[in-house]
Amino acid sequence: MRPSLNPSSVRDTTSCGCQRGCATPVPVTPTAPVELDTGASAVFRIPTMDCPNEENDIRKALANIEGIRSLRFELSARTVTIGATAQAMAAALAAIRQAGFEPESLKPGSVSSAASGLGDFGRALAALGLAVAAEALSFFAPDTLPFSGLGMALAAVAIWLSGFSTYSKGLAALRRGQLNMNALMGVAVTGAFLIGQWPEAAMVMALYAIAELIEARSVDRARNAIKSLLALTPDTAEVRQADGQWCELPAALVAPGAMARVKPGARIPLDGWVTAGSSAVNQAPVTGESIPVDKTIGDPVFAGTINETGILEFEVTAAADNTTLARIIHIVEQAQGSRAPTQRFVDRFAAIYTPAVFFIAVAVAALGPWLFDWGWTQSLYKALVLLVIACPCALVIATPVTVVSGLASAARRGILVKGGAYLEEARKLRAIALDKTGTITEGRPRLVATEALPSSVSESQVLAWAASLAGYSDHPVAKAIASGLNLPANGVTDFVALAGRGVEARTDGHILILGNHRLIEDRGLCSAEIESRLGKHETQGRTVTLLASERQVLAIFAVADTIKESSRMAVEELHQLGITSVMLTGDNSATAKTIARQAGIDDARGNLLPEDKLAAIEEMQRRYGVTAMTGDGINDAPALARADIGVAMGAAGTDTAMEAADVVIMNDDLRRIPEIIRLSRRVHAVLWQNIALALGIKAVFLVLAIAGTATMWMAVFADMGASLLVVANGLRLLNTARMNSDADCPK
């Protein structure tokens, strides 16, 4: 726990807004944007990059350029962040332009909005109106030159209003020999216009433009779901000045170290440590906890959470762009850019499917008159319909919108999944390894028994030495001993932390160790009597720590921890899902088995060093299959890295845990793990529903097109309709209330 500062008196003052009456303000500094990549990087907005197809086109255009270190796409903002050398950056921009896109440089800190404005919808609706007028003229007007010219003019204007970006991107793709969605649409519309089907060409372009705008809005809902949390953070913070006065400042300008205040009912603007006051805080936006958490001096508070009952003063610990909430959003955004296994499969499938349908269309155009006695115009029209059907938009977008919705749904519940791959893989889990302290148990052990063994040193001196060594350790057990003894600490030198065993230091001229049973055995200081004493404590589920000199054991300390009720429920849920649970702990085996029995865990393994936990994970993978490891993200780092999925617990506010694990649980509730497994199964089910839906609709219209009953505008309506259907189906995952139901989750 962070040392508390002297509380200052709370004074109700009228906010001055920093316009007058304020003393010299506390030091504040503008905060720089978070660096996304190491080295030189730049952000570019690409207005016409609105679906995964365009992202793939840009990736392919940049694939062979040396010097590009990193690429990060955000389709919701229509931006790409490029990390590259100056020479490679210039080449990358040229390649993007050759691909049919116009990159626009964004200044640091500027905001790009991808939301389509009313003007875009107005143009698209105007194009649709003109296309309908062109269709009406072709049906009802006399087949004379003036009416034909008027209809062609209306169609041309409709195509112009729909936008020429599709054409430019399509031509660029054809130059590169790529048959993507834009290339197919460009060829189909141009061909239709040339054979005199200009009303159809106009209708196709208008419907395509409207559907893309609706689709973009729908996809943005999924991609921006987690970003809505940013709106929870106040724009201003009440900051104490040098003379003790309180003044409202922009939160973005408040530097770490400043003293801030938040009143009851207000949202906390920044991360910090409480220095005065006590209150209940609703942390649901960050941790997903439904019950407010009591906060007092020394406790952390997080930006975006709600102060409910009392006035809190706190020391700011992070700038506005580096709060826990901001880092959550950053992690989810990075996860959105990763490609899940199903997405990679779909991309490979689309790369085969699209050219195959294109060549079928060519065959229909070329062979139709010979094999089926069709006219050349009729054969060409059928081929153009097939080109529209071949557009892979619905198929390609089916995966990312589903994965992003799943990521956002998990984040709203306080679960950070650092990529679509982990979200998909969670459904395959067959075993999970659980750390004990802080994961299964409360992680707040207390000293319950102290035994000073016979020696030439007085008991008071022995306890003082134990308090000194324990006071220098960050281990929960050592903290419990130091707190339980509550003695002044002597100065120590040569302090060494012994991973998985304890600590060693010199004090009062003596070299002492404070550690577990294994450390005492390694030093050759164990005996039958000590084993007997330890056994009595261990059978009661206590963790035993021993203080020893170079020659003998001086004292025994028994610490007890309690199991979280949520842990019992989580283990039961895991068993219902078919997951085997194993406890891996550095604590003694007797304590481990006692705790495991109380929690309902299948297997318990104690006395494990970090390398032993690593070996245990490897053994579980061979025995059970896909295995997860759950720990604190620091001591369990090797095992977390080796497991198929590493899960860090209670990581709110800790950078280390966020970096170490694949999945981060923002509170200490193990029940989030079965939740993420159920969500993974739902995501998998929805993914394949979307793929089947997209391919099924295309198969139906493929048959209709060959049979001659499908028109071009019907084909594009079917294609874009399928896209909207898969988007809507994927957005169902944003309904987090259903995460607790396993009803539609096939295993």
Image (cartoon, rainbow, N blue to C red):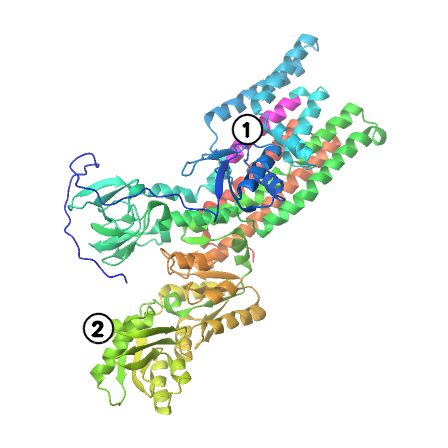
- Numbered tag placed on residue 486 in the rendering: 2
Q: CA distance from mark 2 to mark 1?
A: 71 Å
In front: mark 2 or mark 1? 2
Residue type at mark 2? Asn
Q: Residue 647: x, y in percent?
A: 46, 61
Q: Residue at x 58, y 36 (%)?
A: 96
Direction front: furthest residue? 87
Direction bottom: furthest residue? 528
Instruction: Check disc 2 and report its element: helix, strand or loop.
Output: loop
Quarter of the view holding residue 197 = top right
Query: Where is the C terminus found, in terms of image quarters?
Result: bottom right
Viewer-closest of 74 and 255: 255
Q: Is residue 462 left or right of residue 436?
A: left
Task: Give the dominant element type of the magenta stretch: helix, strand or loop.
Answer: helix
Identify the magenta region. Answer: 200-216
Residue 45: say if magenta. Answer: no
Q: Residue 721: x, y in percent?
A: 58, 34
Q: Is residue 352 left or right of residue 659?
A: right
Q: Residue 502: x, y in percent?
A: 36, 75
Direction right: furthest residue? 370
Label 2, residues with CA under 10 Å away: few <14, some 14-19, many ≥20: few
Viewer-closest of 658 and 704: 658
The residue that label 1 is drawn on is 210
